[in-house]
Image: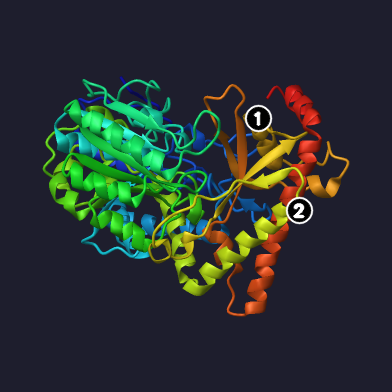
């Protein structure tokens, strides 16, 4: 059973007057709004978002206040908040305070979150009739929302099939079965990681299909498609409905299964397979997003990752073909109320909303306010520049890597079909995985993690070359290749995000060009620092051992 972790005074007894408790809850919520903005932005998430009091960083190496001096190419993982996004979060808080004084905190908060649903749809080029928006503390939490809805609608045994399970979030192995993925929920409830969410009498079955084999080689598109079709066929033969989680795109920029495979699934098992798209990276075009929804797919998105909003801003897009059925749901597993609040769900889903507590998650809301500022800023940049900026950056990264002895790029996925139209500027690679070698051997996951941590630190005290070690920088976390191998390797990632484009944009082409070259110069400096760290990997091991890491 979950227990609440509370930091706001004593708990009132249930026998007290309900109206008094409501007033007290509202007063407490209003008091919370006066906390420092940084603290609010870091609230309402699971422990991964927590800030280390010594370093001032979360486990991704990010801050909750702007730090423009830190070069960041980490949009596949997490990014510190920008100045414009931080300013919007501050304005949003002030506006909510004024509205709450006039209308009450519950009504004011509901109205603002509902307006954000419309804003997000507008940013993504969606009409109100195409999709409903369910907000969530993270993409991992949104996976639980998808499971909640489909389990309730199907009313029968369910198998979750996760495609690219080796390139999705670490919590997916738990959420795919309806299990807790951490020890504390975003709403501060203590739970047991790996145990079923309360109310799941039977655990959901789960099948994990990786993109990479035990040798560290990618399965071909045809192999992946056959494995997906075989898993669906076996599950349905056992009498189960299927929740198929597909990938667009993965930590390395891959999409699976193929469109051709999805067409076959629709033809063979219409009504028996519900597709949910893991689009947390948001490296797909708006036309492709619309096509997914028009086909009746659920889509999980985030405001972080490519769009570079603060980490832990998730949402589940629910297609119109499903949305009309959802308010008829009569029962949900009670454990889901530990994760989600009434305001997460659209206002017109009155029946479903009533099953969740009134509980304002100010951190989740403010992170989405910040993310929406980044999404709007990105789409205000002309289409042609968005395309050319990502192309120039990608070519520059490839040129830098071509003359770097110890680093190499993994080749991008070879895709088939008319991707340019569906994916707009994101048809081209925006994640560049770095395979790092020392003495002819690729680095282990442990050594890659050490380099990743070292990059985020100022290492001048330990370095003879002060210039290379001077500036902390952020890149994408390590991704392991060949987990089943006795000797696995890993890659780090240089990533192009929306902020790269937004910050480079100028109506003056020469200025825009210089801005992009400065970004590439930062990439060059990061690559030089990686090479320095590889050459001093033994010293790095000693330093971490001395710190007890």
Instruction: Name the residue at 19% across, 32% down.
Output: 332
Instruction: Name the residue at 85% across, 46% down.
Output: 466
Residue 291 percent across, percent down from the top left: 29, 58
Residue 153 percent across, percent down from the top left: 16, 38
Identity of the residue furthest to the right in this view: 464
Q: Is residue 133 left or right of residue 377?
A: left
Which of the 4 quarters of the picture holds residue 417?
Answer: bottom left
Q: In this view, does 430 lie to the left or right of 403?
A: left
Label 2 residue SS = loop
Q: Is residue 330 left or right of residue 477?
A: left
Position of the C terminus, as image quadrant, is top right
Of pointers 2 and 1, the one earlier in the residue sequence:
2
Residue 17 percent across, percent down from the top left: 19, 32
Q: How far apart are marks 2 and 1 (CA)?
A: 23 Å
Identity of the residue furthest to the front in this view: 222
Instruction: Name the residue at 26% across, 50% down.
Output: 263
Of residues 166 and 215, the one drawn nearer to the viewer in this rendering: 215
Which residue does the numbered mark 1 point to in the structure image?
444
Label 1 residue SS = loop
């Amino acid at each position: 059973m979950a227990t609440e972790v509370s930091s706001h005074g004593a708990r009132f007894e249930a026998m007290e007057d309900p109206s008094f408790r409501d007033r007290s809850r509202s007063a407490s919520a209003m008091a919370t709004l006066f906390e420092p903005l940084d603290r609010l932005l870091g609230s309402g998430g699971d422990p991964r978002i927590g800030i280390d009091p010594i370093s001032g960083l979360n486990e991704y190496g990010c801050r909750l206040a702007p730090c423009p001096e830190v070069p960041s190419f980490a949009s596949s993982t997490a990014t510190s908040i920008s100045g414009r996004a931080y300013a919007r979060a501050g304005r949003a808080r002030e506006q909510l305070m004024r509205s709450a004084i006039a209308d009450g905190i519950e009504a004011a908060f509901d109205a603002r979150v509902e307006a954000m649903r419309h804003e997000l749809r507008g940013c993504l080029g969606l009409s109100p009739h195409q999709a409903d928006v369910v907000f969530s503390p993270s993409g991992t939490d949104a996976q639980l929302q998808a499971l909640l809805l489909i389990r309730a609608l199907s009313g029968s045994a369910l198998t979750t099939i996760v495609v690219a399970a080796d390139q999705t979030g670490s919590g997916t192995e738990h959420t795919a079965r309806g299990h807790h993925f951490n020890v504390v929920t975003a709403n501060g409830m203590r739970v047991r990681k790996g145990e079923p969410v309360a109310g799941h009498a039977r655990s959901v079955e789960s099948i994990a299909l990786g993109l990479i084999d035990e040798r560290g080689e990618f399965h071909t598109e045809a192999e992946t498609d056959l494995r997906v079709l075989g898993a669906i066929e076996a599950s349905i033969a056992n009498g189960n409905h299927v929740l198929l989680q597909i990938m667009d795109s993965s930590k390395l920029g891959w999409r699976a299964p193929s469109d051709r495979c999805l067409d076959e699934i629709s033809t063979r098992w219409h009504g028996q397979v519900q597709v949910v798209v893991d689009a947390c990276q948001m490296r797909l075009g708006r036309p492709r997003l619309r096509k997914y929804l028009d086909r009746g797919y659920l889509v999980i998105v985030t405001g972080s990752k490519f769009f570079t909003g603060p980490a832990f801003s998730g949402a589940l897009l629910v297609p119109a073909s499903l949305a009309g059925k959802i308010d008829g749901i009569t029962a949900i597993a009670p454990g889901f109320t530990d994760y989600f609040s009434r305001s997460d769900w659209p206002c017109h889903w009155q029946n479903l909303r009533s099953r969740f507590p009134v509980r304002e998650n100010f951190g989740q809301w403010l992170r989405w306010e910040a993310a929406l500022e980044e999404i709007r800023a990105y789409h205000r940049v002309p289409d042609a520049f968005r395309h050319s900026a990502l192309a120039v950056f990608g070519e520059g990264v490839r040129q830098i890597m071509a003359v770097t002895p110890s680093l190499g790029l993994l080749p991008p996925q070879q895709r088939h079909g008319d991707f340019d139209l569906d994916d707009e500027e994101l048809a081209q690679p925006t994640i560049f995985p770095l395979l790092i070698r020392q003495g002819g051997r690729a680095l282990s996951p442990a050594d890659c993690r050490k380099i990743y941590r070292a990059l985020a630190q100022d290492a001048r005290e330990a370095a003879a070359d002060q210039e290379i070690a001077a500036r902390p920088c952020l890149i994408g976390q390590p991704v392991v290749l060949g987990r089943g191998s006795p000797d696995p390797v890993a890659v780090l990632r240089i990533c192009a995000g929306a902020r790269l484009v937004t910050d480079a944009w100028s109506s003056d082409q020469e200025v825009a060009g210089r801005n992009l070259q400065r970004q590439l110069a930062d990439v060059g400096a990061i690559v030089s620092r990686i090479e320095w760290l590889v050459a001093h990997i033994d010293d790095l091991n000693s330093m971490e051992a001395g710190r007890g890491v």
